[in-house]
Amino acid sequence: MTDIILHHFDSSPFAEKVRLALGLKGLEWFSVEIPMVMPKPALTALTGGYRKTPVMQIGADIFCDTQCIAAALEQRFPTPSLFPHDSRGLCLALSQWSDNAFFQPGAGLSMGTNTELPEDILQDRREFFNFLDFSTLEQQLPHLYSQFRAQLQLVETMLADGRGYVLGNAASWADILAYFPIWMCRGNIASAASLLQSLPALLTWEKRMQQIGHGKPTHMAPEQALAIARDTAIDAVPEISAEAWPALELHTAVTVTPQDYGAVPVAGELLRLTQDEVAIRREDELAGEVVVHFPRIGYYVEASA
Ligand SMILES: N[C@@H](CCC(=O)N[C@@H](CS)C(=O)NCC(=O)O)C(=O)O
C-alpha cells in the first residue's frame, strides 16, 4: 500500500510545503481535510495525540512533521529529488531557519494583522503558539515587520544572481522552505504587497514556485483514511541504531514529544530510533495497529515512567 494520504487544511502554511513537494514530484494523493482547531478526533486516533498540521499517512504508517514527511516522500518517490545535487543535509538543516526565524514573525504578523481570522482560531493559537507573547502583540508589530522583511531580503539575496532556484537550476526542498512563509504572508499579513515590493528576484522566483502546483489530489473522508489504517499491515522495519541516543531497547515503552509548541506526548512501543527518525508502534480503537514516525531533530524521546 503506497497511496499517500495528506491530513491538512487549505490555509496551513506547513501543509503548503508538503503540497508543493507532492507537486514537485508530480504525485497523485488523497486529501483529508482536518479541523483547524482541536478537537481533531480522526487525526489524533492516527497520531496518538500529535495535533499539528500536516500529517501524512501511507497505509498504517503515520508521518508527523514536515521534516519527516519530506524524508519519507523522498525515500519512496526519489525522482525528481527534493534534495538535488546531494543537498539533503543542507536542505534539512535549512528548516531550522525557515520554520523558526522566518515563519515565527510571519505567524505573529498573521495573528496580529489578519482581521478576518475567526475568534475560535485566534483563541486556539493564543494557547498553541507559545513563541508569541499575545499580551503585547500589538506593540511588537513594528519589530515583527522588521524581522520578516529582513528574512525576505535574505531570500532576495539567495536569488540575486538570476538563478532559477535557491540551489541553482532545479527546484528543491530549500525553495519550498524559503517560499512557504511568503505564501503565508500573501494570504494573511496586512500590507503584504508593500512588504514584498522592491524584491525583484524574489518576485520572479515566487511565480516559478506558484507553477509547481500540488500534484493530483483526490478528496477522501476521514473515516476512509481510518479504515485504510485498520486494514493495512504496518510497513516500518524495526531498527535501533547503535549510535542513537538515548540508549533504549527495541519495544521499550516510550513517549515522543515536540520540544516546541503543541507539546503533546505520544505514547507507544519503540520500533525505530536512528539519527533521522523515531517511530513508535501503537494500537488504537479507531485506527488499529499503527506506526507513528517523527523526525529525530526537535523531539524528546523518553522511556515511559
Ligand atoms: N514542526 C511542524 C510544525 C507544524 C505547524 O506548526 N503547523 C501549524 C499549522 S501551519 C499547526 O499545527 N497549527 C495548529 C493546528 O493545525 O492545529 C512541522 O514541520 O510540520
Image: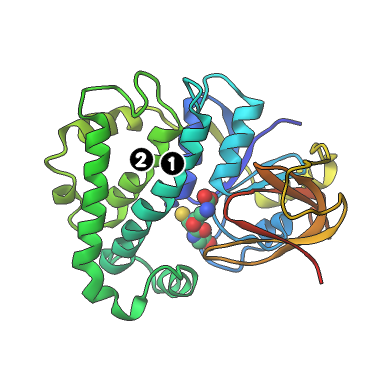
Query: Looking at the picture, does residue 259 appear above or below residue 26?
Result: below
Find residue 11 and report its horizontal and vertical position in percent: 42, 52
Q: Please name whichever residue, 127 or 57, is drawn nearer the observer in this view of the structure.
A: 127
The percent coordinates of residue 51 (x first, y second) are: 60, 61
Q: How many marks?
A: 2
Disc 1 packing (10 Å; few <14; some 14–19; many ≥20): some
Element class at badge 2: helix
Residue under numbered circle 2: 178
Image-based side of 224 in relation to 259, left or right: right
Q: Quadrant of residue 72?
A: top right
Say what amino acid the circle numbered 1 marks: Leu
Give the numbered dot on residue 94.
1
Q: Is 188 positioned to the left or the right of 89 in the image?
A: left
For mark 1, give the secondary structure: helix
Residue 151 position within the rendered picture, expressed as x and y whole percent measured from the top left: 27, 48
Residue sitting at x 34%, y 31%:
209
Vertical placement of 280 versus 154: above or below? Answer: below
Q: Earlier in the sequence, mark 1 or mark 2?
A: 1
**In terms of image quadrants, where is residue 142?**
bottom left
Looking at the picture, tell me which residue is in the foreground, 89 or 138.
89
Q: Quadrant of the N terminus?
A: top right
Q: Residues within 10 Å of mark 2 (few under 14, many from 20)?
A: many
Residue at 45% x, 68% y is 129
Q: Are marks 1 and 2 in contact (CB under 8 Å)?
A: yes
Q: Amino acid at mark 2?
A: Ala
